[in-house]
């Protein structure tokens, strides 16, 4: 009881802090930008100022938050699922499955938009299905089999994508490769709303499963003895995390590092209890990616061009993570 | 008896062999039907050394070059315009003009990854490449195999003059180059006179809509827009550059031009994308135009047609400039 109360108190504190941080990031993302804005005009639809603040800036900030949260929560889940600290949406092949789906949509003539998003989503779920089958050993989803299937599938996906890119007309090739760089450009409100619903539902599902995720950490036999249906739990986690990844990649293309860095950083700060870690990672991922997006937009002023957001996530996330690792050296990380 | 008779035969065979190998590496300068080169100071008969448009020294090559390969569509058009069409023995896959003669000319592959084997098999005297279209690795691979490569850098209207002169000199059509340059400039002046005095619309050239890439200054299409009576709003960037959407909303272009030659099927979708931003005068006034014709992006002999096309878009009611 005491443990539970302490956990709840800690959870509340962590959530409060991260939510405040997220709101601050979203506010900054809306207020700051390349152009100066006349704030009296912003509230009038139809003016450029309104479009700049509400649709370009706020739209991107929200998309970044939603995608970042999804990728981070999925990252934690994948790491627990395969008991490997290097797991993330990429490593397990779901991201590259989405990329194959997107590449096929582009070749079929669907540009950026709903068709492409559906193609990416379908590709991710296709990858999921394949990895699911390959990861089953005697009816149970086995961590190292899942990991191996993912790694192999990644290589295969890349070969398919590069072949498609090479055989296509230059315009199609360019479109594919630009999509692969990942982009949080101003989303359609309807698409954003749909993706947000899917992602929020997925994160909520993960939160509901966090006690079972804690049990999985001690091993299959231990979890089983605690009454957890290990096989079913693993399958549910895989599907949920994959849907989160699929939605993210469908909306913004493949964005790296969020799914691996944010979980580890948060784990070093709040500990391995999934009941705190999952919500914290989701909020932390949202905060991290929307901040990175703001920085890429502002980078135009100094660099004369806006780098893909993956560049920022790597540049910020990498050193931060290394510093944290250094401070915590000798401690158990995972 | 047999031994003494074999010696002269062997010597002759050896001599032929040396000549054959030497000719193979000489790029055809020893061709008996070849007219003597004029006024050169090359060490080998008929070869000259050049510096190409990016400052590279080119392998010594015979001039006038009898067999040339073009690896970029604009260079193909320029060669034909100079009257050097008969000398073109190979082109890249994307060269599409002039259409009829090209049906008889072998294609050597894509701009990005042309077939080195095919090119070498065609025994060219020189291969013309474009800095923007072709890779350095292609030029290096060809040079390692003994094929001279001349790299052009044609990014503006002024560059077209220079490239015409380069191509003309190497193919023995220097006089035609001068005439072509004059023709192009007269054409451009006619367009400029026609649009003179009219208000200049603010233009944005969108190379990719989402994420947004535009054509800034130091691009060929930028020059054409200036001639055609418009002003490129993206003048704060150079070349083809990513651009913040916020700035477009601040700059409020009157016309948005979408060059879609490399992906014409994307035209309608790209135009529809801009319906998301009715705050822009270009969208409000329905002046978002997808232009499939390569004339507006290809620095070649049809650039006057490109200027005319843009003038008609930017200055409606102008008739034929």
Image (spheres, coloured by chain):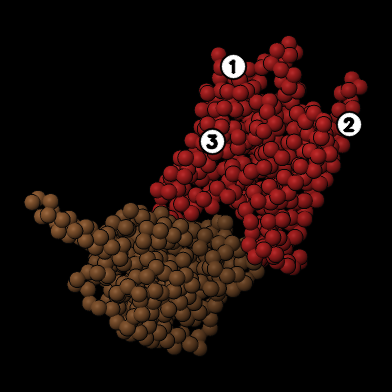
Quarter of the picture holding the N terminus of chain A: top right
> Pointer 1: what residue?
A140
Residue A243 or residue A47, whichever sits in front: A243
| Mark 3 burial class by Cα count in 10 Å: few <14, some 14-19, many 20+ | many
Residue A29 or residue A40, whichever sits in front: A29
Is residue A211 toward the left or the right of residue A78 in the image?
A: right
Quick one: which chain is red?
Answer: A
Quadrant in the picture for residue A221:
top right
Q: Which mark is residue A188?
A: none
Q: Is residue A304 above or below residue A272?
A: below
* Chain to which the residue tagged by mark 3 belongs: A
Whether label 2 touches label 3, CB < 8 Å: no
Quarter of the picture holding the C terminus of chain A: top right
Quick one: which chain is brown?
Answer: B
Which residue is painted at 45% across and 52% down in the image? A172
Which residue is painted at 40% across and 58% down in the image? B144
Q: Secondary structure at mark 2?
A: helix
> Pointer 3: what residue?
A154
> Pointer 2: what residue?
A9
């Amino acid at each position: 009881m005491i443990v539970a109360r302490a956990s709840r108190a800690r959870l509340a504190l962590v959530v409060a802090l991260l939510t405040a941080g997220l709101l601050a990031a979203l506010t900054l993302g809306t207020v700051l930008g390349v152009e100066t804005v006349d704030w009296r005009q912003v509230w009038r639809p139809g003016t450029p100022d309104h479009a700049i603040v509400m649709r370009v800036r706020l739209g991107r900030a929200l998309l970044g938050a939603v995608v970042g949260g999804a990728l981070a929560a999925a990252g934690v889940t994948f790491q627990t699922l395969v008991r490997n600290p290097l797991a993330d949406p990429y490593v397990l092949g779901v991201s590259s499955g989405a990329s194959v789906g997107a590449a096929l949509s582009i070749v079929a003539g669907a540009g950026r938009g709903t068709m492409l998003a559906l193609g990416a989503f379908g590709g991710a779920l296709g990858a999921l299905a394949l990895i699911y089958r390959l990861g089953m050993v005697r009816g149970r989803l086995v961590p190292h089999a899942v990991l191996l299937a993912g790694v192999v599938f990644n290589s295969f996906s890349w070969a398919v994508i590069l072949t498609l890119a090479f055989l296509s007309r230059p315009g199609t090739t360019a479109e594919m490769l630009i999509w692969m760089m990942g982009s949080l450009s101003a989303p359609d409100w309807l698409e954003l709303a749909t993706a947000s619903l899917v992602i929020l539902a997925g994160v909520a599902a993960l939160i509901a499963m966090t006690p079972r995720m804690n049990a999985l950490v001690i091993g299959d036999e231990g979890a089983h003895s605690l009454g957890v249906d290990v096989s079913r739990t693993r399958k549910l986690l895989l599907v949920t995390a994959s849907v989160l990844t699929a939605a993210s990649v469908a909306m913004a293309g493949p964005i790296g590092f969020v799914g691996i860095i944010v979980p580890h950083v948060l784990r070093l700060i709040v500990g391995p209890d999934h009941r705190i870690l999952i919500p914290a990672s989701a909020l932390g991922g949202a905060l991290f990616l929307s901040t990175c997006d703001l920085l890429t937009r502002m980078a135009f002023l100094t660099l004369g061009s806006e780098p893909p957001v993956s560049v920022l996530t790597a540049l910020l996330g990498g050193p931060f993570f290394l510093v944290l690792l250094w401070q915590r050296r000798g401690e158990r990380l995972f | 008896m047999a031994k003494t008779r074999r010696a002269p035969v062997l010597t002759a065979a050896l001599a032929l062999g040396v000549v054959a190998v030497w000719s193979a590496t000489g790029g055809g300068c020893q061709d008996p039907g070849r007219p003597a080169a004029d006024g050169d100071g090359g060490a080998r008969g008929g070869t000259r050394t050049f510096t190409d448009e990016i400052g590279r020294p080119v392998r010594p090559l015979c001039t006038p070059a009898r067999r040339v390969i073009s690896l970029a569509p604009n260079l193909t058009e320029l060669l034909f315009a100079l009257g050097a069409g008969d000398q073109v023995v190979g082109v890249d896959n994307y060269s599409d003009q002039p259409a009829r003669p090209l049906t008889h000319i072998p294609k050597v592959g894509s701009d990005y990854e042309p077939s080195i084997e095919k090119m070498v098999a065609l025994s060219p005297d020189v291969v013309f490449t474009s800095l923007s279209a072709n890779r350095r690795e292609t030029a290096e691979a060809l040079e390692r195999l003994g094929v001279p490569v001349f790299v052009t850098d044609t990014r503006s209207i002024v560059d077209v003059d220079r490239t015409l002169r380069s191509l003309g000199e190497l193919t023995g059509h220097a006089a035609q180059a001068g005439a072509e340059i004059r023709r192009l400039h007269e054409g451009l002046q006619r367009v400029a006179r026609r649009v003179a005095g009219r208000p200049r619309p603010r233009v944005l050239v969108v190379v990719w809509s989402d994420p947004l890439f535009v054509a800034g200054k130091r691009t060929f299409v930028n020059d054409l827009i200036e001639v055609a009576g418009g002003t490129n709003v993206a003048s704060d960037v150079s070349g083809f550059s990513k651009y913040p959407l916020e700035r477009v909303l601040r700059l409020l272009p009157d016309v948005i031009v979408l060059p879609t030659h490399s992906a014409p099927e994307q035209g309608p979708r790209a135009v529809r994308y801009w319906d998301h931003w009715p705050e822009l005068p270009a969208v409000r006034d329905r002046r978002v135009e997808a232009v499939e014709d390569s004339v507006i992006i290809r620095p070649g002999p049809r650039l006057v047609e490109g200027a005319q096309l843009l003038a008609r878009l930017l200055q409606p009611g102008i008739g034929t400039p």
